[in-house]
């Protein structure tokens, strides 16, 4: 099976090696943990301790690894 835009074969879970599956699961777990921690912090933190609107930060946190890390670096007023 190839994709129209890239011409590359799409990969299925069963096509991955055990190492690739493990890496995918580990990275996914880390990403979900970061996001859950950031959302919990955002929910508990008063608005005056957040740089910008909390609604915007809640959406930013959903962006892979970068969102939660950006929130912890730039979103929290110190």
Image: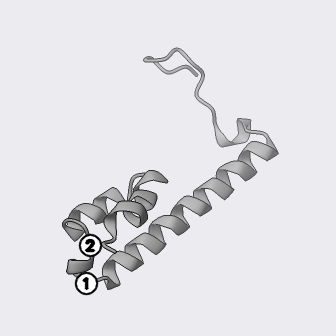
Horizontally, is 53 left or right of 63 in the view? left
Measured as percent of width and height from the top left, residue 4 is found at: 44, 17
In the rendered image, which quarter contains the N terminus? top right
Residue at the image point whose x is 67% and y is 42% from the top: 13
Task: Tell me the distance, in whole angstroms, between the alpha carbons under discs 2 and 1.
Answer: 7 Å
Measured as percent of width and height from the top left, residue 35 is found at: 46, 65
Q: Nearer the viewer, residue 44 or 10?
A: 44
Q: Within 10 angstroms of label 2, few (less than 14), some, or many (20 or more) residues? A: some
- Residue under label 1: 46
Secondary structure type for disc 1:
loop
Horizontally, is 8 left or right of 56 in the view? right
- Residue under label 2: 50
* Disc ID at residue 77: none
Q: Is residue 24 above or below residue 73?
A: above
Q: Outermost residue toward the front? A: 78
Kindly indicate whether the residue at mark 1 contacts the one at mark 2 (C-beta within 8 angstroms): yes
Residue at the image point whose x is 20% and y is 65% from the top: 52
Q: Is residue 39 above or below residue 20?
A: below
């Amino acid at each position: 099976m190839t994709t129209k835009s890239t011409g590359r074969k799409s990969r299925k879970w069963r096509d991955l090696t055990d190492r690739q599956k493990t890496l995918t699961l580990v990275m996914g777990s880390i990403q979900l943990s970061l996001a859950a921690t950031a959302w919990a912090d955002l929910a508990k933190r008063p608005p005056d301790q957040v740089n910008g609107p909390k609604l915007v930060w809640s959406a930013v946190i959903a962006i892979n690894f970068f969102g939660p890390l950006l929130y912890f670096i730039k979103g929290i007023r110190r």
